[in-house]
Structures are given as C-alpha cells and as structure tokens.
Image: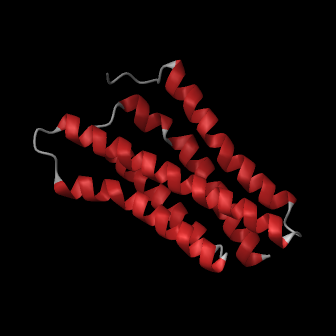
Amino acid sequence: MFKLKPSASPFILTALGAVPFLAAALAMLINKNNPVMINAAGLWLNVYAAVILSFLGGVRWGVEIVAHETPRAVVLILAIIGALVGWTNVLFYFQFASGWGFLVLAAAFLGYFMTDRGSRDMPVWYRSLRIWPSAVAIGCLLVGFGLLELL
C-alpha cells in the first residue's frame, strides 16, 4: 500500500481531473474582454474547485476512518472545511462575481496539499501525486483572480 509511485489509474484520473481547471482558466483568458463569458468561465472554475475540494475532503475523511479505530475529530472537521469553503465561494461568486474568492480557494487547496503531504496515514504515492495537480489548481485559481481583479 505504501509504494512510491502511483499505478496508472490514479495517475491518469488525476491528469484528467486537472483538465477542467486548465479549460476554465483558458476560457477566462480567451474571453478576458467579454464580461459575460469571463464571468461564466469564472463560475465554471469556482464550481469545479468546490467539487474537487469536497472530493479531497472525502479522501481525507476516508483515510482517517480506515486508519484510526477512533477517528480524530480535528481531522474529520478539517476534512469538511473544503466543502464548506467551496460552497460558500460559489454563493459568493453568484452574488458578487468577484475574483477574491479564488484566493480563498487557492489557500484551501494549499492547506489540503500541505496537510496531506505531512500525513503519515496517506500512502507515499498519493502524497507525491498531489504535487502537480495542486500546483495546477492553485495556478488556475490565481489566473482567475488576476483576470477578474487585476486587469
């Protein structure tokens, strides 16, 4: 279970999971002069980030309940924060169409990455696999922030 490299399935599925981040950020870049389309693509990015944060929290929750006979409450609480942050950001985006929520989402991805990288309950291959997709997600969220708030 604690091998160093992931098998093909997790690697391929992770790569495919990064595509919507890249597609939404690219759509925002392409449509940076079209307010309707940049906001639509921003919503796509926001919603997908919320979905993936929920997924990462579910992974963390699942590992905790399998690894510990008595799951640690603090880990379970941290596992649901991503879903709550993502949901709140989607609501915030609908109300304000602001890029500031992308910074919050990027921080949540960084937090989950650092927590998972430091967890000895996670397989070594999973901790290694999380590096580049986390960088892609954070990078795309920063692009969204930049396009909506800095340009």
Q: Looking at the image, which is closer to me, 116 or 57?
A: 57
Q: Looking at the image, which is closer to me, 107 or 40?
A: 40
Q: Residue 17, how many percent across, how many down?
A: 59, 39
Query: In the figure, 123 relative to 18: above or below?
Result: above
Query: In the figure, 147 relative to 1: above or below?
Result: below
Q: Residue 67, how many percent across, how many down?
A: 20, 36
62 sits to left or right of 69:
right
Quadrant (top left/top right/bottom left/bottom right) for the C terminus: bottom right
How many numbered marks does the figure carry? 0
Q: Residue at x 79, y 66 (%)?
A: 38
Q: Residue 12, how many percent across, how many down?
A: 59, 26
- Whether residue 120 appears in this view of the structure is no
- Quadrant in which residue 142 is drawn: bottom right
74 sits to left or right of 30:
left
Q: Residue furthest left?
A: 70
Q: Residue at x 48, y 19 (%)?
A: 7
- Whether residue 61 appears in this view of the structure is yes
Q: Residue furthest right?
A: 33
Q: Residue at x 67, y 69 (%)?
A: 145
Q: Residue at x 51, y 51 (%)?
A: 51
Q: Residue 80, how many percent across, how many down?
A: 34, 57
- Quadrant in which residue 96 is drawn: bottom right
Query: In the figure, 26 relative to 63: above or below?
Result: below
31 sits to left or right of 16:
right
